[in-house]
Image (cartoon, grey):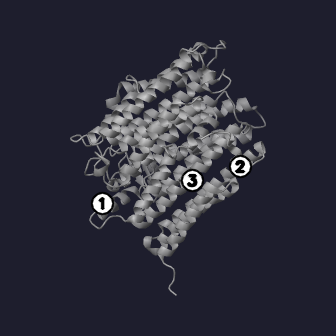
């Protein structure tokens, strides 16, 4: 069996991105929505590392370190806002925060 | 590298270093003073210190702009140029207006953290305005956005603030994910991390069979991410809620400095790095060329339509400003399309975009400062709360009128020249065939609609009768901020061509060096 190549990794990363996007759009629990956002960022990480591994030098892997840090900060802010929301309204469901219209 | 090499670096990085120190100082100050002073005193003291520090930043930036030296570090990771210093000055002025608004109206208990978030966000904008590499653009964009999410949600007792902040965070996170995924394809296919490298690679690919499908997918994903950032329709859904929910000082930053940085980075990417794959939208759709132009044209038309028509129907001043900002995103995108048939941008395009972004940031900061002054004695921020406000507080109402007229594009104001240059650039691009006339005509028609709703807001203030006639007093520092912003808006309007010439001669403007 031949080892996986660049295209295999790219397919996996595209699938992860789509799964994450679907999660953001479809899931009703805000915690799961935040997790889906993380999946999308990690899909990009996977693509960057794959490109880096198959011929683009180390830049992509350095990029990933920054992305991981930024993603952690983003989750921290997101969870803080979720906690504030839960304290105020007692809910973390998307359908319950429709006070503001589109 | 020895010590003497570091000194010039320090001179170029001084604004960023000062700003980081200020932000950390605000955090420490809060920790040290929270037992000693009450909220309002801390708000005042730390606020004045922040203003002082930002004033020092302005001086340093002015010096950088006057010296006319350029420093580029690490393959475009950080570029300090006079032009960038000018853009940073505009962002700093807008943030100073926001800090001034918050001086006497404590809307949060943790005032030091609040100022620290504002300053960190401005730091992110500084790096964003200096970034010419994909990594720095992503990191700086997040450094700008993350504090703004928290600021938008900072009124923890108000449901609309939390919800607005949450929506902003979710849409902002989504946009970051799209941008990053796009970046990963763009980097992966080209192997280039810097914008200049990307452009050269794309030029080389013209003779080598084109950049390939994945690269173009990456560019499209990045346009989606940028569209979220500058609130272009159909990616504007977060803006009305975030603006309405955020406390006015935070909303002022969202609408001014953050928008300025977003427009500049979009211009650097599209008109700088991705120029060779622009395509065009000249003439009838049958003669268009594939590239990012048709996609951006769709965003421009959608923003002009949605922003202007939805603004007509608004009843809340902040939501109204959100839709107005969508409409202005549409205006500015028109100049992104000012490319001739061979893909060269009109000479006016980049300076016009920069001029418009600066004017827009200053004017919007002024609008929010004036609304803040008027909202002092009002129950809320719906139009109904501002009825006859001119009789209660003629001073801020007068300045609000000036800023609204500038946004509407009435001649003596800078806003008029901003729009004029954008549309002139679009017409110049293909002057012999009037290739972009369709887009400019549509934008002009939509700007007539815009005139209507800005004047309607002015009418609420000046013509409609007030129910409550008690005068609203405006604090001195807010008056000073309003006068300063109005002078800038009028001054940039009185000398538009010299500003434009200055932007043009400052070398490269938005387009990358070398």
As helix, strand or loop, the secondary structure at mark 2 comes to helix
On the question of residue B461 being in view, the answer is yes
Query: Mark 1 and mark 3: span between their CA atoms?
Result: 31 Å
Q: Return the residue nearer the eye: B496 or B410.
A: B410
Which mark's residue is nearer the viewer, 1 or 3? 3
For residue B156, side relative to residue A40 (left or right):
right
Q: Could you tell me residue B103's position as x and y percent?
A: 64, 29
| Viewer-nearest of discs 2 and 1 | 2
Q: What residue did someone put label 3 on? A: B174
Name the one closer to the observer, B425 or B439.
B439
Query: What numbered label is drawn on residue B203?
Result: 1
Say if labels 2 and 1 share a chain.
no
- Determine whether the residue tagged by mark 3 lies in a helix, strand or loop: helix
Q: Residue at x 46, y 74 (%)?
A: A54
* Alpha carbon distance from label 3 to label 2: 17 Å
On screen, residue A89 versus residue B243, left or right, reads right
Instruction: Report which quarter residue B74 is drawn in.
Output: bottom left
Return the chain for callout 3. B
Q: Residues within 10 Å of mark 2 (few under 14, many from 20)?
A: many
Residue B478 coordinates in the image, percent (x, y): 58, 24
Quadrant where the C terminus of chain A is found in the figure: top right
* Residue A73 seen: no
Q: Residue at x 32, y 39 (%)?
A: B438
Crowding at label 3, few (<14), some or many (≥20) Cα neighbours within 10 Å?
Answer: many
Mark 1 vs 3, N-terminal side: 3
| Chain letter of the residue beneath label 2 in the structure image | A
Residue B318 position in % (x across, y down)? 58, 32
- Secondary structure at numbered mark 1: helix
Query: Which residue is under mark 2?
Result: A82
């Amino acid at each position: 069996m031949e080892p996986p190549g660049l295209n295999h990794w790219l397919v996996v990363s595209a699938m992860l991105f789509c799964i994450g996007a679907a999660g953001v759009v479809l899931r009703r629990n805000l915690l799961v929505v935040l997790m889906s956002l993380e999946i999308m960022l990690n899909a990009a990480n996977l693509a960057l590392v794959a490109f880096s591994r198959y011929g683009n030098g180390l830049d992509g892997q350095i990029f990933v370190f920054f992305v991981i840090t930024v993603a952690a900060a983003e989750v921290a802010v997101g969870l803080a806002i979720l906690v504030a929301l839960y304290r105020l309204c007692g809910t973390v469901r998307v359908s319950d925060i429709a006070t503001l219209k589109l | 590298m020895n010590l003497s090499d570091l000194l010039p670096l320090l001179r170029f990085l001084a604004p960023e270093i000062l700003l980081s120190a200020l932000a950390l100082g605000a955090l420490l100050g809060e920790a040290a003073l929270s037992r000693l002073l009450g909220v309002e005193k801390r708000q005042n003291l730390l606020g004045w210190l922040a203003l002082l520090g930002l004033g020092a930043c302005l001086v340093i930036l002015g010096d950088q702009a006057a010296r006319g030296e350029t420093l580029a570090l690490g393959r475009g990771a950080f570029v300090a140029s006079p032009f960038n210093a000018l853009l940073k000055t505009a962002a700093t002025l807008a943030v100073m207006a926001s800090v001034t608004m918050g001086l006497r109206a404590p809307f949060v208990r943790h005032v030091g953290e609040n100022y620290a978030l504002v300053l960190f966000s401005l730091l992110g904008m500084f790096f964003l305005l200096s970034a010419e590499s994909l990594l720095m653009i992503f990191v700086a964009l997040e450094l700008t956005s993350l504090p703004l999410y928290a600021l938008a949600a900072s009124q923890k007792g108000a449901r609309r603030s939390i919800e607005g902040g949450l929506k902003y965070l979710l849409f902002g996170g989504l946009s970051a994910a799209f941008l990053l995924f796009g970046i990963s394809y763009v980097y992966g296919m080209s192997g280039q991390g810097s914008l200049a490298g990307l452009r050269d690679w794309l030029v080389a690919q013209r003779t080598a069979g084109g950049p390939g499908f994945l690269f173009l997918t990456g560019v499209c994903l990045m346009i989606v991410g940028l569209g979220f950032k500058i609130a272009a329709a159909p990616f504007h859904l977060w803006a009305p809620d975030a603006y309405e929910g955020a406390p006015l000082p935070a909303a002022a930053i969202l609408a001014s400095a953050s928008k300025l940085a977003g427009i500049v980075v979009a211009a650097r990417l599209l008109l700088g790095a991705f120029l060779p794959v622009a395509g065009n939208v000249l003439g009838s759709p049958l003669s268009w060329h594939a590239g990012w132009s048709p996609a951006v044209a769709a965003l421009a038309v959608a923003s002009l339509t949605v922003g202007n028509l939805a603004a007509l129907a608004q009843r809340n001043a902040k939501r109204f400003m959100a839709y107005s900002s969508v409409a202005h995103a549409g205006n500015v995108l028109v100049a992104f399309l000012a490319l001739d048939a061979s893909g060269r941008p009109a000479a006016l395009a980049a300076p016009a975009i920069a001029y418009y972004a600066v004017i827009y940031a200053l004017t919007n900061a002024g609008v929010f400062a004036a609304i803040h002054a008027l909202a002092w004695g009002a129950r809320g921020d719906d139009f109904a709360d501002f009825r006859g406000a001119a009789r209660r507080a003629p001073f801020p109402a007068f300045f609000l009128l000036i800023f609204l007229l500038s946004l509407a594009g009435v001649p003596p104001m800078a806003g008029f020249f901003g729009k004029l240059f954008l549309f002139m650039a679009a017409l110049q691009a293909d002057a012999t065939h009037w290739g972009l006339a369709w887009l400019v005509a549509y934008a002009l028609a939509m700007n007539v609609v815009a005139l209507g709703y800005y004047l309607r807001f002015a009418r609420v203030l000046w013509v409609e009768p007030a129910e409550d006639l008690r005068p609203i007093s405006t604090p001195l520092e807010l008056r000073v901020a309003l006068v300063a912003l109005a002078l800038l808006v009028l001054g940039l309007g009185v000398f538009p061509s010299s500003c434009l010439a200055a932007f043009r001669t400052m070398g490269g403007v938005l387009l990358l060096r070398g």
